[in-house]
Every structure is written in C-alpha cells, then in structure tokens.
Amino acid sequence: MRKYEVMYIIRPDIEQEAVQAAVEKFQGIISNGGEITKHEVMGKRRLAYEIKKFRDGTFVLVNFTATPEVVAELERIMKISDEVIRYLITLDVA
C-alpha cells in the first residue's frame, strides 16, 4: 500500500447536506481497501481562476494509504461526479 493525497473542489451552489454526502461517498471509496490518515474540509474559498463558470468552491484535502486499484476507482468516480469541479490525486512522498 502506498501513501496518497487527494484534493478536490466541490461546486459552491449545492447544499451543505449534499457536500457532506459527497465527502462521505469519497471516504467510503477510500475506506474500501485503504485507510484515511488525515481528512480536512477546508471550507469555501475563492478560486484562482474560473472553472466551469464557478468562482468559488469547497476545498477538501484527504491523505490516505491505499492500493493502486482503490486510487483508480476513486479517480473514476470523481470524473463522473457532478459535485466535483476539479480534483488532483498525487503520490505522497513525505
């Protein structure tokens, strides 16, 4: 198992309950074969540039250990999720 870090931005126009549901959905995917070491909802912030006509977004940062298969599944789900406007999964070398 390797250490990974994922940061994703959730659309600002959805309700807080929907944000929480999306966060729990992604946590469930990671927990199914991996382990979350750190999870932080950083809150709504201003984007550096407009993404999909949005100027703000709710930022979420997750550090976890998992197999490459779990990471592939997480990326697949994030690609098709309407709530996520941008995401980045990196291998944590620290």
Image: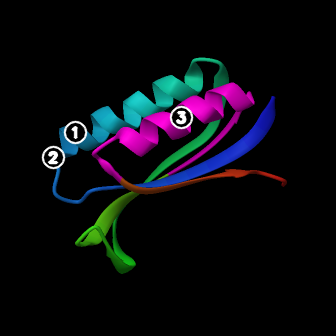
Q: Which quadrant does the C terminus fall into?
A: bottom right
Query: Which quarter of the picture shows residue 72?
Result: top right
Query: Secondary structure under badge 2?
Result: loop
Residue at image position (44%, 42%) is 78
Determine whether, in the image, residue 9 is placed left or right of residue 72: left
Instruction: State whether residue 71 is above or below residue 50.
Output: above
* Of residues 92 and 84, the one drawn nearer to the viewer in this rendering: 84
Name the residue that disc number 3 marks.
74
Quadrant housing residue 24? top left
Secondary structure at badge 3 equals helix
Where 38 sits versus 36, above or below?
A: below
C-alpha gap between disc 2 and disc 1: 5 Å
Task: Verify CB contact (< 8 Å) between mark 3 and mark 2.
Answer: no
Pointer 2 with pointer 1, Cβ within 8 A = yes
Q: Magenta segment, which residues?
A: 61-84
76 vs 14, left or right, is: right
Residue 20: x and y in percent read 30, 38
For disc 2, the marked residue is: 15
Expressed as whole percent of the image width and height from the top left, the position of residue 81 reads 34, 41
Residue of label 1: 18
- Tell me if residue 73 comes above or below residue 86 in the rendering: above
Residue plotted at (54% across, 40% down): 75
Left/right of residue 42 with respect to residue 3 in the rendered view: left
Amino acid type, residue under disc 3 in the picture:
Leu
Instruction: Tell me how far mark 3 sits from mark 2, CA to CA.
Output: 22 Å
